[in-house]
Amino acid sequence: MARPRLYDRVLSEHFERNRQMAFVSGPRQVGKTTTCRRDSTDYLNWDNQDHRRVIQRGPGAVATLLGLDRLRAHRPRVVFDELHKHPRWKAFIKGFFDTYGDGLEVVVTGSSRLDVFRRGGDSLMGRYFLYRMHPFSVAECISPDAREGLIQPPSAVGDADWKALIEHGGFPEPFLKRDVRFTRRWRSSRHDQLVREDVRDIAQIQDIGALETLAQLLSERSSEQLVYSSLSRQLGVAVDTVRRWVGLLGRMHFGFLVRPWFKNVTKALRKEPKWFLRDWSGIRDEGQRTETFIACHLIKAVDAWTDAGLGDFEVRYLRDKLKREVDFVVVRDGSPWFLVEAKTSDARVSPSLQHFQRQTAAEHAFQLVMNLPFVDADCFAHQAPTVVPARTLLSQLI
């Protein structure tokens, strides 16, 4: 059963305010095509042979197929899906938009590879805005409407949605189906498609077996620091090769890196990033799953805030040579904004939160606990380190 996404409203607001195309990037099977087609009038998919023949004939042929010379009551919205597979897709979409863009809304989407190919040049500069799509989150379960501003009033997520998020992840199909056997098969299929098909399509990897082994190792090490030299020895490849492969898997949205924050932090670690999977549903260790669950929510929030033009946001972590650590620090316009220490069960406030809040001058510091019940109170009304329920804090994000 389909369920509204906050990105429905994001796209509507984009075209209310802007003439630029909307590029929608995100992980495989995150729901990009379903969302982008919902309010479209026309849809062209490069994988459809009939559509492909028209696209290959050029912008004029597409305009004729879509009937863009006809009077319409509303501006048409055309979606180009998997267009990045066209060898000259940038030249095509540039010519199409420059010729016909004033009279219609253009959405370009596809697999996660769209964002990889987008990095290859700036010939489309000024002609599009990028929106990064993420799986369902606590806040999106509560309200699929895109809400103004950064922090929202707290609101309780339903018990069924909360349990489904933790057990099945936030990707639409397993989250909505909520069947354990389906989720396991879906997760295995997605992993195989990403490593064996998507990676091969965009990179010439000679030792695909070693890359698959790396992906398996990374699946077991979500929330852990990556030591490239150790991975190099395990795989029998050069350190630079491991670094390049990890970067590739990150760009393919298999997972993402969170790097240490070290400005104004005494004896801070500067090199080792932490690795997190995009799909937390298959993580067996409860502590690793909790930290990954929180990391994915924070990444979704900072991407959404940045894409909306609310500032420049990123997620980092804190650790010093004395092994004091805080799981996450959300950075806003180059300055730490709030700290988050993720816990599965209730505990006293970590001394590291207090220490690093003083070091970074972050405005807020939260010890976020998964098993605490929702509390109807604004977490961001507090500045001193505070124990807060995950259900409450995450409901205030995106």
Image: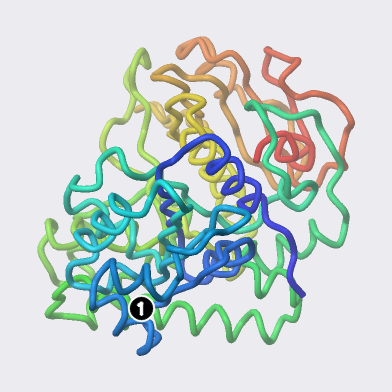
Q: Return the x and y of residue 130 as percentages of the image width and height.
A: 41, 46
Q: Amino acid at mark 1?
A: Trp
Residue corresponding to mark 1 = 46
Q: Secondary structure at mark 1?
A: loop
Is 98 above or below relative to 18?
A: below
Q: Quadrant of the C terminus?
A: top right
| Colour approach in the figure | rainbow
Indicate the position of residue 206 as horizontal and vertical percent values.
12, 80
- Decide: few, some or many residues near mark 1? Use Cα within 10 Å; few <14, some 14-19, many ≥20: many
When asked about the image quadrant of residue 69, the answer is bottom left
Residue drawn at point x = 70 percent, y = 69 percent: 175
Residue in view at x 33 percent, y 56 percent: 115
Seen from the viewer's position, the closer of residues 316 and 217 is: 316
Q: Residue at x 39, y 26 (%)?
A: 322
- Quadrant location of the N terminus in the rendered image: bottom right
Q: Residue 220, can we see it?
A: no
Looking at the picture, does residue 155 appear above or below residue 248?
Answer: above
Residue at position x 44%, y 40% in the image: 19
Residue at far bottom of view: 49
Can the viewer see residue 238?
A: yes
Q: Position of residue 155 (x, y in %)?
A: 84, 38
What x and y, as percent, mark residue 266? 35, 15
Q: Is residue 311 left or right of residue 195?
A: right
Residue 72 lies in what quarter of the image?
bottom right
**Would you place residue 150 above or below residue 201 in this image?**
above
